Image (cartoon, rainbow, N blue to C red):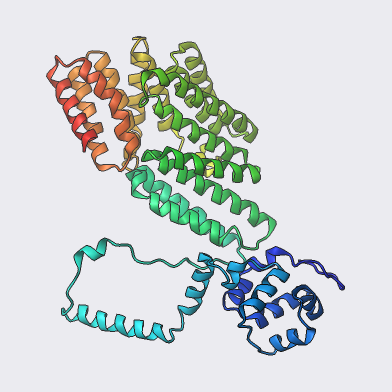
Amino acid sequence: MNVQPGFEGPVDPSVWRERPMRLALARRDLGAVFRLLSRRGVTQRQIATLTGQAQSEISEILSGRQVMAYELLTRIADGLGIPHGYLGLSYDPETSAILAAAAGGCPEGDDVDTTRELIAHAAQVTMGAARFDVEHWSSLVPQEQTPGRRRIDTVDVEQLEGITQVLRALDARNGGGSCRDAVLAQVAWAQRGLLGAECTDDVDRRRHLAIADLHNLAGWVSFDIGLYSSANRHYQRALEQASHAKDASLVANILYRMGRLHLHLVDTVPSAERATQARLALKLFQLGQIAAQESGCEVTVAMLCTNEAAAYAALGDERQTLRSLGRAQDEFARGDLATAAKWVRFFGVADLNATTGVAHAALADHLPDRRRDAIEALTRSLASRGTDAARSQAFELTALSSVHLLDGNFAHGAALGDQAVALAERIRSTRVVDRLLPLQRLARRYAGNSDCRELTTRIAGLRAA
């Protein structure tokens, strides 16, 4: 805030959100508040004018006089434009957290008694004299917010990017249910601790990209456990910040994930609604295609094309499905995965084959010629998967099982289905279980075969668990 001499107008509201000012306000240390204002060019005379006080009163407060009267505190808050909660004149959870954090390093009064109780308890536990309330352990430990930073640099953003990558790997290996709470905790910290901090323009853009990608992951893990409304809220926030940072590649990736949500619903909604969900997915993939073209990344374009093909397949449009798959192969062949943005590097040969196989499998029920293509693509994708992609393996095994059942290979198809169920039992993913529903319906169609009956029973047991 740049204040010129003679300024008599209101104080810039952003001043009150700065960390040192928030702490001074929370403690009602108005002397510190006035000194911080003076560093920004606000004079004692200006403070007196805005608050309706004599300049001598301002000098007294700067010299150590404590302001205790509620009426005067309110007048000062209103005159300077300080939010009442920041001065404790109304309840504000962040102000409470700031005070708690400030007090944490130096226990006084009641805190001393609490510390003594903790030491006594620790001694009892260590010596084996404590009696435990086991049921109490399920209650949450009271939490205090981690203090934010006044200024951040590249290192802070790099740390958030690294944490996002670790959490994304956990999701891929164990399902969204294994890490969603951790992802949401990081989202809360990033919004509170990074968005309000000062930084250079370069760090600012990278900050928005990192938080957009984190929201993108929050949407994905929420989608994975069936929390569709929550997923869409995070996707919207991710899309806004990625667009603000002008990164077309990330915009395309977010639109791809939004489309995947609707493509997934094709198999879970009543039959009358399936075409609607497929068309919604297609529209989002087509929007993503625009951003992908703008990004100049062939891998991103290929990712959108294969998923576009899967949406066309869900609508039964063989011609457009094959056309999109052909373009995806061409774009992927021209791309360089090593130089692609980190949020698209997951889309390697295995994912290209997997989505291609799923698209062919969607057509296989009424177009038998597509079964061979589906089996070949899905078999290739499974062969190139590592042990850290259990969820993807479960999806591909499910699709491959379905095609083999359609082709009359009941024993092999049921065995593949059993493998998919075994993976689903250890992955915390509602989406994996949902994908087994069409396989269950298909296996029930061949109930005269004992392998299909057993597979139907096993899937039903998993879905009922």
In this view, 133 is above or below 244: below
Q: Nearer the viewer, residue 181 or 90?
A: 90
Q: Farthest residue to the right: give it.
A: 6
* In the depicted structure, whether residue 365 falls above or below residue 102: above
State the image quarter where residue 356 is shown: top left
Return the residue found at the far left. 450
Residue 201 % position (x, y): 69, 56
Q: Residue at x 26, y 37 (%)?
A: 424
Q: Quadrant of residue 277?
A: top left
Question: In the figure, is residue 285 to the left or right of 349?
Answer: right
Which quarter of the rendered picture does the C terminus lie within?
Answer: top left
* Percent of width and height locating residue 328: 51, 24
Number of marks: 0
Q: Is residue 177 left or right of residue 258?
A: left
Quadrant in which residue 315 is drawn: top left
Let me know if residue 150 appears in the view: no
Q: Residue at x 57, y 78 (%)?
A: 27
In this rendering, would 15 be left or right of 242? right
Examine the rendered structure and indicate whether residue 405 appears above or below residue 427: above
Residue occupying the far front of the picture: 71
Query: Which part of the image, by quadrant, shows the N terminus?
Result: bottom right
Residue 188 x/y as whole percent: 49, 56
Rendered location of residue 105, percent (x, y): 46, 80
State the residue in front, 55 or 69: 69
- Residue 339 in view of the camera: yes
